Amino acid sequence: MTQLDDRPTSTGSPLLGDAYANDRARVFHSWSAQGALNPTVIAGALGSKFWDDTGREWIDFSSMLVNMNIGHQHPRMIQAIKDQLDTLCMVAPPFANDQRSEAARLIVEKANLGRDGAARANGHFEKVFFTNAGAEGVENAVRMAKGHTGRMKVLSAYRSYHGGTALTVGLTGEPRRLENEPSVPGLVKFWGPYPYRSAFHSDSPEQETERALAHLRDTILMEGADKVAAIVLESVIGTNGVLVPPPGYLEGLRAICDEFGIVWIADEVMAGFGRTGQWFAFQNWDAQPDLIAFAKGVNSGYIPLGGVVISGPIAHAYDNKMFPGGLTYSGHPLACSSAVASIGIFEEEGVLANARHLGNDIIGPALRDLAERHPSVGEVRGLGVFWAVELVSDPATREPAPASTVAAVVAECKAHGMWPLSAANRIHVVPPCNTPDELVREGLAILDAALSVSDAAMP
């Protein structure tokens, strides 16, 4: 498996010296109070590491934004993009293109696999609509579902993130949506399963599944089952806690959707393409959605790319009527060439197997050990290279650790050469899927030491 450890000999861009000043003067950052920012200037990256303009280096335990699934600067990815630059840089969506066609073929092929890696007999998914990012994927999936069903309401979970457009931030269940309300009409929230902090006062994962499904069904009935076009759900909740669905939940969701003729849209933007050890996270269970929104790991963000994988009935609903949507850069040949290359890397370098190995043999056992030894760790959960460490102030009451404590743990990790991802009261462990064992162990050891900060902060 390719993982590069030596930095390139290039000294970097001549603009590097002005990068910080120009950023602060001219760049407007997302989800931020602009005056409070102090961004690190990233000068380069390779494999599962990156470094700043002073040469200081970190293990990338964030995969940037959980998207560098094959790591930084993979030579095969770079070469594929260079080759495509020499061939064709741009073609408009109405034309056919070899890279776009091959990317679609490969993505559909992977979506039609079961949890055992074998092709499902039903050939459920048929086509791909390409977008530039995950939010556009979710947005167009909702548009397809509404057009297919003739209904207008869409359900999504409270603990969720689906994007920053008008529709997708409205679908988002976390507090970031609040400053953007009111949003698109017809969006309805429900509580999904979360055994550690159950909204249903459940005593077991099985009971959580039963009660969460009953709540979802009741919500649909109260909203009018014949009015609901779609349920949008992250197959494994990402930013809001790496919430792995308890046994039977996705199968039960599928049954409810079938009962009421509702389209299930799986948001796989973060969880897809190896993050959980499968091509798509839903393949860890015995249930298939109707539409899949994807982005991030499809090409590790080397060039912006997202899309929707479309099941046969919905794809064919638009055989004789226009799909009312489109994008100038839909299926951009540079982006699609990188997706083709990425899927080849996954297959030839055993990336899925490595993600499962890291989760089963290294990350999972190490985090469970941390939970035993650190009283500030309330719960660890995840699969593949998709894990969260939930920090608490009191293990008995499960009171979340305050933001200041989480920030202190993050700072301690960074000070010792590991860059984690944090959200609310959690540290997320999400390195690239092809990170070498020894580098993962090094990062986990840094996290282990840093958790002494949260332990000391407990009352």
Image (cartoon, rainbow, N blue to C red):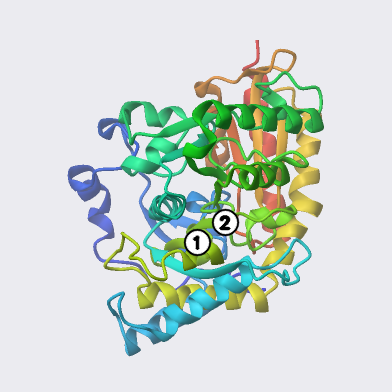
Q: Give the distance between the C-alpha atoms of the residues marked 1 and 2, in whole angstroms.
A: 8 Å
Q: Is residue 292 left or right of residue 123?
A: left
Image quarter (top left, top right, bottom left or bottom right) of the C terminus? top right
**Mark 1: secondary structure:** helix
Decide: marks 1, 2 in contact (CB < 8 A)?
Answer: yes
User: Is residue 178 placed above or below 346 in the rendered structure?
Assistant: above
Residue 168 numbered mark, or none: none
Judge by depth and name the residue closer to the eye, 437 or 356: 356
Q: Quadrant of residue 49?
A: bottom right
| Residue 135 percent across, percent down from the top left | 40, 50
For marks 1 and 2, the one nearer the N-term is: 2
Residue that appears at 65% across and 15% down: 458
Q: Residues within 10 Å of mark 2 (few under 14, many from 20)?
A: many
Q: Which three-letter amino acid code belongs to the residue tagged 2?
A: Asp
User: Is residue 49 placed above or below 126 in the rendered structure?
Assistant: above
User: Is residue 122 placed above or below 416 in the rendered structure?
Assistant: below
| Residue 347 percent across, percent down from the top left | 66, 76
To which residue does mark 2 refer? 290
Residue that appears at 51% across and 53% down: 269
Q: Is residue 41 visible?
A: yes
Judge by depth and name the residue closer to the eye, 148 or 398: 148
Q: Residues within 10 Å of mark 1 (few under 14, many from 20)?
A: many
Q: Residue furthest bottom?
A: 87
To which residue does mark 1 refer? 314
